[in-house]
Amino acid sequence: AIWAHVTGQPHCMGTLFWQLNDVWAGPSWSTVDHTGTWKAAMYEVARSYRPLVLDLRHAEGTVVATMWNEEADPDLLLAITQVFTTDGRCLRYDSLWFSPATGLNELVRIPVTDVSSGSPSERTLVHVRVLDHRGDLLADRTLTMAPWGMMDWQRSRIALTPDLTRAGRYRLSTDVPVPNVHLRAPGATLSDNDFYLLPGADRWIEVGGGAPPTWEVWPP
C-alpha cells in the first residue's frame, strides 16, 4: 500500500496510518510500543518512505525490480542483483551503474525461468540492492520464489563485528540467507532492525548509546 501511495504522486501526496504508538503495554497493531521502542513494522515504514525506495515482485512469469527516486540531482548509483539458494550459494550476479531519473526507474527484468537455474523454488530467492558511489546501502529488497513460510531456510552463522574507526557502528554478516534478524540493544537507538541478511551483503548498523547489540534470527 505504501508503494502505491508513494508512486501515486501527485494524486496521492502522503499517508496516515493507524496505529502509531501504544499508551500502555499490551498486544496491538501499533508500530511503536508504550516505551517508545520501535517495533519491526516501524522500521519497515521508515524504509518505505526513504527518498529512494525499491519494489521487487514476481509478475506474469517475470521478476521485476523498480526504484522510486525523489532526489532531484542524484549521484551515479550501483544496482546489484543476486540469486541465492537457501544454503548460501550464489546462482547469479549482475551489476549496473546508472544515473536514476526522478520518479520510477525499472532496474531489473528477469524471466522466472532464468532465475532458478534448476534450483527448487522453495530454495531460491532474489536480492536487489542499490548502493551509492561510496558503497553505502541506499535500498534493498528480497523476493522468495516460494511463499515465505514454505522456504527451506537453513541454520545460519551470524557474525557481529565492531567498526574500529567509528564508535557504535557494527557490521553484521552471514553464511546463508536469513529472512529476519532482530537486534536487541536496551536503552539504545538502532539505525535499522528486523531485516533480511544475505551472504556477501553485509549490513552496517549504528547503535546510539547502550551496550553492543545482541541478536536473534528466524528461523532460530
Image: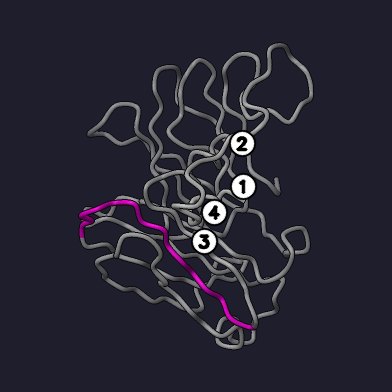
Amino acid found under the numbered disc labelled 3: Asp
Mark-to-mark CA distance, 3 and 2: 19 Å
Place of residue 86 in the rendered image (x, y in percent of width and height, measured from the top left): 62, 66
> Label 2 belongs to which residue?
40
- The residue sitting at 20% across, 55% down in the picture is 73
Instruction: Relative to 101, say whether 188 is above or below.
Output: above
Q: Which comes sooner in the sequence, label 3 or label 1?
A: 3
Tell me which segment is drawn in magenta: 61-75
Place of residue 32 in the rendered image (x, y in percent of width and height, measured from the top left): 61, 24
> Label 1 belongs to which residue?
180
Mark-to-mark CA distance, 3 and 4: 7 Å
For label 3, the SS is: strand
> Label 3 belongs to which residue?
55
Q: Which comes sooner in the sequence, label 2 or label 1?
A: 2
- Residue 3's label in the rendered image is 4
Mark-to-mark CA distance, 3 and 1: 18 Å
